[in-house]
């Protein structure tokens, strides 16, 4: 499944193309994100659009919000099984809640993916096996 196909599948859940592309990226690369990562991905500043997007994720129970040590900061864990099924990864380990240390690792991986979007990242086991063969 290509990145465009994954984004289109997520878009069917009522997301804009930009939001769907971000959600598909998060699902593949850790399942957790913070609002600044969406801002970086979309090339926007933090504001009402970002707040509405994350409020919708939690209101529709696609994601769970966890407070951070830093006052006012939150980590969002996207865990909805139907979203993972739509991108072809229904049994992804990223659906499970992670420890703080693991969540931080996943956030750093997502940062790296977002910084180097021109690279072809091998996110799934299937992609890695295909590449190595």
Image (cartoon, rainbow, N blue to C red):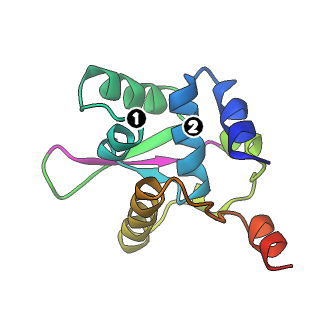
Q: Quadrant of residue 43?
A: top left
* Residue 112 spot, x, y in % from top left: 42, 63
Q: Where 99 falls versus 4 (above or below)? A: below
Q: Looking at the image, how many numbered discs can be counted on the residues?
A: 2
Q: Please state the extent of the stretch shown in magenta in the rendering.
A: 72-80
Inspect the magenta stretch and tell me whether residue 1 lies in it.
no
Res 48 seen here: yes
- Left or right: residue 70 versus residue 34 is left
> Residue at 78% of width from left, 49% of height from top?
88
> Residue at 53% of width from left, 50% of height from top?
26
In the rendered structure, find residue 42 and report the number of the disc placed on it.
1
Q: Where 67 falls versus 50 (above or below)? A: below
Depth order, front residue of 92/9:
9
Q: Where 125 falls versus 53 (above or below)? A: below
* Residue 10 spot, x, y in % from top left: 66, 33
Residue on which the image places disc 2: 21
């Amino acid at each position: 499944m290509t990145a465009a196909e994954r984004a289109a599948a997520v878009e069917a859940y009522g997301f804009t193309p930009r939001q769907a592309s971000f959600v598909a990226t998060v699902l593949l690369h850790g399942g957790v994100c913070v609002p600044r990562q969406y801002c970086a991905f979309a090339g926007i500043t933090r504001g009402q659009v970002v707040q509405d997007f994350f409020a919708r994720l939690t209101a529709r129970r696609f994601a769970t919000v966890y407070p951070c040590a830093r006052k006012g900061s939150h980590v969002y864990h996207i865990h909805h099984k139907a979203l993972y099924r739509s991108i072809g990864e229904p049994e992804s380990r990223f659906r499970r809640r992670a420890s703080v240390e693991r969540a931080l690792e996943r956030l750093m991986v997502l940062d790296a993916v977002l910084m180097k979007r021109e690279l072809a990242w091998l996110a799934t086991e299937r992609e890695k096996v295909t590449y190595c063969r």
